[in-house]
Image: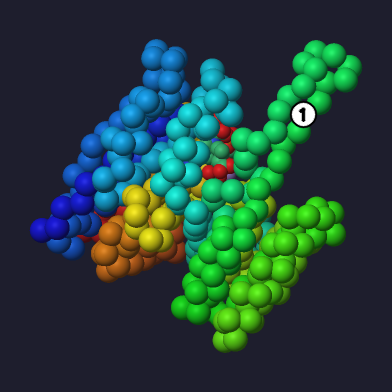
């Protein structure tokens, strides 16, 4: 039996509900696949912020830097400004652990209602989101608060090293998939960073002659993802564009409640972090009705990262077969199943 040490951060809202649900699936499957997850649980959250004045302890990152992976639910609560909660926990983990790849697969499962008529189970693509630089930066400032001359400036940072490594990741990923990369950009409006991104993509594409690629403006690309989602294979995008695109694409696949994500440090110098695309969903938190699929599929990505591809396949197939052969759906997908009912059915399917 192989044991992996997991830093578990359920966080806020439905993070507290979907994370334990997902762990129960990972544990059950692990018994048959020769692994055990040993969890160290951390209460880092907005609740902690309210009682202790910080989302995590000052040495928080040191406490988790030697774990094999981090499994996180969601962070955010209406009682704490989002930029305080997210920059106090999630974003420092992504940055200091150099998790520069945010991998967000999109699949339309048979039996899952998509708001997009043309979306069939042929839809199977991955958003590769740059995760540590770009539009998310601390550089900038607020001036003249409260006066008519008040202003805010926010810089975007794109480095050659940063763009190159994410683009290379996307092209390499495409080699093992449909051999096509779409680069999401906006060089008609954003005249410094985006043409730079385009140039790096064109240069790197030259070193992957087996991969076809296209460049699309992010606005037009959003329309194409809705109108013809099956045409995409790997979409590479900056931090902000990738963020927006991944929620849009998740909605095309039925709900953001089904979308998984992995924040990867490909060099494995630091642990990678696995967290679903969705947030803490304060509007449904505490009701036991959150869709656990995003978290479970995220868990499958973690188990794959830890070397258990067969276990991950089994979990992903069980999700697909539950959707294809039953009408069990949580509320976001038009059903009435609770989180628990869905997880129980999934456990049964896996046993
Ligand atoms: P959200 O993803 O939390 O919710 C958007 C909508 O989708 C809501 O109506 C919600 O009920 C629904 N939804 C989300 N996940 C669902 C699930 N699993 N099952 C069923 N319905 C689901 O986005 P938001 O409302 O913009 O953000 C809420 C809070 O979460 C904010 O504080 C935000 O900053 C934070 N957030 C955190 C993360 C993260 O920790 N990774 C990601 C996104 C947002
Ligand atoms: C996500 C979230 C975060 C992001 C927020 C909460 C900072 O939307 O993980 O997609 O923008 O990265
Ligand atoms: Mn997001």
Q: Is residue 48 left or right of residue 249?
A: left
Nearest the camera: 1 or 19? 1
Q: Crowding near pointer 1: few (<14 within 10 Å), some, many (20+)?
A: few
Nearest the camera: 350 or 300? 300
Q: Residue furthest bottom?
A: 210
Q: Is residue 284 visible?
A: no
Please provide percent x and percent y for residue 134: 64, 49
Q: Which of the four quarters of the rendered structure image does ligand 2 lie in?
A: top right
Which residue does the image show at 58% across and 81% down from the upper left?
207
Please provide percent x and percent y for residue 8: 31, 39
Q: Is residue 158 left or right of residue 8?
A: right
Residue topped by disc 1: 152
Q: Quadrant of the C terminus?
A: bottom left
Q: Residue furthest left?
A: 1
Please provide percent x and percent y for residue 233: 58, 72
Nearest the camera: 18 or 73? 73
């Amino acid at each position: 039996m192989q044991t992996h040490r997991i830093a578990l951060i359920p966080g806020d809202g439905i993070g507290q509900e979907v994370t334990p649900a997902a762990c129960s699936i990972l544990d059950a499957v692990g018994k048959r696949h020769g692994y055990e997850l040993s969890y160290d649980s951390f209460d880092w959250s907005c609740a902690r912020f309210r009682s202790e004045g910080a989302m995590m302890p000052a040495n928080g990152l040191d406490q988790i830097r030697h774990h094999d992976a981090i499994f996180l639910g969601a962070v955010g609560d209406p009682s704490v400004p989002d930029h305080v909660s997210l920059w106090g926990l999630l974003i420092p983990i992504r940055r200091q652990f150099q998790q520069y790849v945010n991998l967000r697969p999109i699949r339309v499962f048979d039996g899952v209602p998509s708001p997009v008529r043309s979306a069939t189970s042929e839809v199977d693509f991955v958003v590769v989101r740059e995760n540590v630089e770009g539009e998310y930066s601390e550089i900038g400032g607020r001036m003249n608060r409260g006066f008519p001359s008040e202003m805010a400036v926010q810089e975007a940072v794109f480095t050659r090293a940063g763009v190159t490594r994410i683009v290379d990741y996307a092209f390499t990923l495409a080699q093992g998939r449909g051999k096509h990369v779409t680069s999401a950009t906006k060089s008609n409006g954003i005249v410094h960073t985006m043409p730079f991104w385009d140039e790096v993509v064109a240069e790197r594409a030259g070193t992957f002659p087996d991969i076809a690629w296209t460049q699309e403006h992010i606005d037009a690309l959003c329309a194409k993802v809705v109108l013809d989602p099956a045409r995409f294979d790997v979409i590479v995008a900056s931090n902000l564009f990738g963020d927006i695109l991944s929620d849009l694409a998740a909605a095309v696949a039925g709900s953001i409640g089904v979308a998984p994500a992995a924040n990867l440090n490909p060099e494995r110098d630091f642990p990678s972090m696995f967290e679903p695309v969705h947030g803490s969903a304060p509007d449904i938190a505490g009701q036991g009705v959150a869709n656990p699929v995003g978290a479970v599929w995220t868990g499958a990505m973690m188990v794959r990262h830890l070397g258990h591809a067969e276990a991950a396949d089994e979990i992903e197939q069980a999700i697909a077969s539950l959707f294809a052969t039953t009408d069990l759906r949580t509320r976001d997908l038009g059903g009435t199943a609770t989180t628990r009912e869905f997880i129980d059915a999934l456990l049964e399917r896996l046993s």
